[in-house]
Amino acid sequence: MHFPIKHIANNIGTCLFIIILVLLASNANSKQSAEEIIKERKTLFSKNYKTAKKVQSLSSSGDFDQAKELMIEMSKNYETLLGLFPENSKEGFKTGSLPAIWEDKDNFNALMAKSSSDMVKLASIIESSEDVKSTIGKLMWSNCKACHSKYRKEH
């Protein structure tokens, strides 16, 4: 069989074009994925902050049932956050995360896990606490402060 050079060159050109498109598409997807991850974690942290303020207010006024529901919600959010710091999400998209998260991943993950378990503990003891404000400070706000001081850019 005789294959003209033009036909072979055409096929090689088409294959290269397809390979380039696939590479560009996969690169765009990884950037999109990082953007989605960063947006999701920013949303969860923001939600936890707003929820923490509600927990403080509800607990201070003695509405423990609703406060406990919110504490459990926050706990679940911290568990979700554990999976939202992959290597490809270190920078970009206005992330407030510092490189220390990835440099000190075990301690960061331990803090997220502690934050989650402390919210469950808070829900179990808040009604019997003699000093609601202090208990909330110890089991909720101290974790926020610990994370912000080491792992978040100043804002």
Image (cartoon, rainbow, N blue to C red):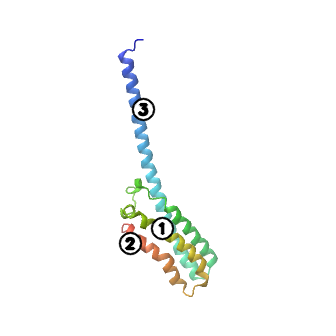
* Labels 1 and 2: the sequence-earlier one: 1
Give neighbour class at mark 3: few <14, some 14-19, many 20+ (Cα, 10 Å): few
Q: Is residue 47 visible?
A: yes
List x then y, in percent, for residue 148.
41, 70
- Type of the residue with mark 3: Ile
Quadrant of the image occupied by residue 20: top left
Q: Quadrant of the N terminus?
A: top left
The answer to whether residue 149 is above or below residue 13 is: below
The answer to whether residue 24 is above or below residue 35 is: above
Marks 3 and 2, how far apart at CA: 47 Å
Q: Residue at x 41, y 44 (%)?
A: 27
Give neighbour class at mark 1: few <14, some 14-19, many 20+ (Cα, 10 Å): many
- Give the label on residue 112, or none: 1
Q: Secondary structure at mark 2?
A: helix
Q: Is residue 45 left or right of residue 16?
A: right
Marks 3 and 1, how far apart at CA: 43 Å
* Labels 3 and 1: the sequence-earlier one: 3
Give neighbour class at mark 2: few <14, some 14-19, many 20+ (Cα, 10 Å): few
Residue to which mark 2 is pinned? 149
Judge depth for marks 3 and 1 and give the one in front: 1
Q: Residue furthest right?
A: 65
Q: Is residue 96 visible?
A: no
Q: Residue at x 58, y 85 (%)?
A: 129
The answer to whether residue 43 is above or below residue 128 is: above
Marks 1 and 2, how far apart at CA: 14 Å
Judge depth for marks 1 and 2 and give the one in front: 1
Residue to which mark 3 is pinned? 18
List x then y, in percent, for residue 88.
41, 53
The answer to whether residue 33 is above or below residue 67 is: above
Q: Residue at x 43, y 52 (%)?
A: 34
- Type of the residue with mark 1: Met
